[in-house]
Image: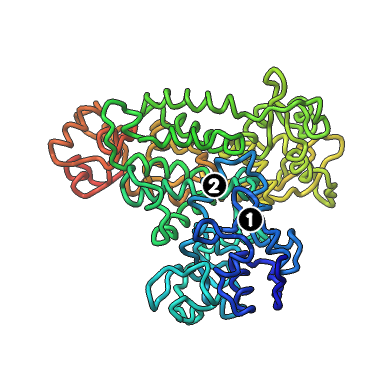
Amino acid sequence: MTKVLLRRVIPYPDESIRGYMIRLAQANNASPRKLYKLSSLIAGVDPKSLLMIIEKADISKLCELTNLDEDCLLKLTFFYQMGMYGDEDEQILRHISSFGMCTTAYCQVCPVCLHEQPYHRKLWEIRSVTTCPFHQCKLTTTCSKCQKNISPIRRFVTHCNCGFDLRKYDIEKVPESETLLAIMMNERLFGRESSRYFLTGELQELSFRHFLYLHILFCFYFYQILSSQVKVNYSAAFKPIHMHETSIKTFQMFVDWSRSFYDFIDSYRKIPKTFENSKLLKEFGMLHHQLIKHLDAKEYSFVLKSLLDYCNENKTQAAFLNKLKQKIDHTLSRTEKKIDITQAKDKYVDFKTTEKILGISEYIIVDLMRMREIIVVKGRKGIRYCAIESIEKIEKCFKKNIPMKSLNINSEELVTFHEIQTVMNRKIRISEFIVAIIRKKIQPSGTLDGEQGLNRLVFRIADVHRLIKGQGISIQEAAEILMVTTQSLYSWSNKGFLETINNKFSINKDLFDQFVTQYIPLTTLAKLHPKIRSSKRLYEWLDERDIQPVSGRYIDGGCAYLYRKSPLLMRVMDLSSWP
């Protein structure tokens, strides 16, 4: 017959099962290890983790000891977030269990939280969460007195086994931006709402387990970048001493997806590699193989699509990327979400119906799909359908009637959505303008009767001009100004010389002006030289005078040569000023 504990403590809603075992043992003047034995939760000589990442542990005896029902105790574990999906996502969960959670050898705590309320939080069990979402400080994993790891089966929740009071630990403050991951994970665990973080649609829609898996996967890749090594083992990458920096960098990439993903790939390509026979392996190592292997589930197809977009933007500078494109296309063809439309007629409509509802052409719908504003799935024979949920989000922009009041539709101050391109002059795309409406960056001044979809909307021309100014100039327009190809601009952007916005479709006007002030393309220099007109010959001529470009094929793999405007270059070119 199982004994019943005389003192049965009530768990906190956000408490960890391992922390609860410490408090329960403390209340009954026993050691946590003895309590684990009483509950038959010993594996060999060590207590079981009890976090239940892969499967449910047998806690029936613990339920009897505490007189608590199983559901109450399971909420202290990760069973409902992960363990209950063990059959369908076993590989993902095993990876999380090995590298994403604190082990039986150590745990992490927030000294301020322990001072406010002495119990061990469930959030602290996630290894990649390295900051406190409430106190803007780092979590600590070692005791400042004995310098040993803080044990998850210590005698007292507030003290290290050496006797040091963890509440007296000198905390290390961090910027608020470094707590965003902790805030988000805390809210996902406990269902709280907040708008203090921003992720793209696909990342935001990932389940808890799928997001955590993706995060720890990229933590490993960022460790490779920071250590400038591709041959590292997982145990080294996920040591507490490295986790904070890699975790923060990974989440910052997620916040600024997908532009930051391109920067990540560029940084990864710079790591020294030992492959000599294959250009693709020499540039990417095994990164592309690992991404395709580990992210072949449909939930992660957006990552592979971003990698495909990267290949498309850089294909002129690297022909070997075509081989990589083929690999990605093959994987996406297997993971592309397909549905039986006859079973989901109330959730999806075809493209023709979508065009009629929104009042826009198919190419704009496709553009919105690429910008991930409209969710598209494939039915039989590859026919694409749009999710009604994403269409309704856009419908909200024009369904409500907005009286024109004293405004005259024929006024030169107003423009209809149908004629909006005449005002924008192709400086931003129609799809970008629609996204601005959805994000409420521009508000319609009225609606028209007798029109369908977005064509109902009327805007002030002054508001449109303000929006365009805020959006920057298009890549095409910038290329025309510099008299270079758009591929050249994308290359310089990827190398960090020029910052783009709006998913790399635009450039901030001030930053572009700054770029023009500091740099000049080789093709422009060729037009300024009094005798040499050949770019190749001019490159060699400048090289003979020890003037090197900052970007280009033989410098950083860029597809176009770029020079820094310097007094020496001006003197050699015999120029009195820069154009």
Looking at the rendered image, the quarter that the C terminus falls into is top left
- Tell whether 313 sits left or right of 428: left
Where is mark 1, residue-wise? Answer: 78
Residue projecting furthest to the left: 544
Q: Is residue 20 left or right of residue 479?
A: right
**Residue 245 in the image, given as x and y percentages of width and height:** 42, 58
- Residue 418 place in picture, x, y as percent: 72, 34
In the picture of the structure, the residue carrying the numbered disc 2 is 213
In this view, 480 is above or below 106 = above
Determine whether the residue tagged by mark 1 lies in a helix, strand or loop: loop
**Residue 516 on image: x %, y %:** 37, 45
Would you identify the image quadrant in which residue 339 lies? top right
| Amino acid carrying mark 1 in the image | Phe
Residue visible at 41% across and 57% down in the picture? 239
Eyeballing the image, is 478 above or below 247?
above
Residue farthest along the front direction in this orientation = 1
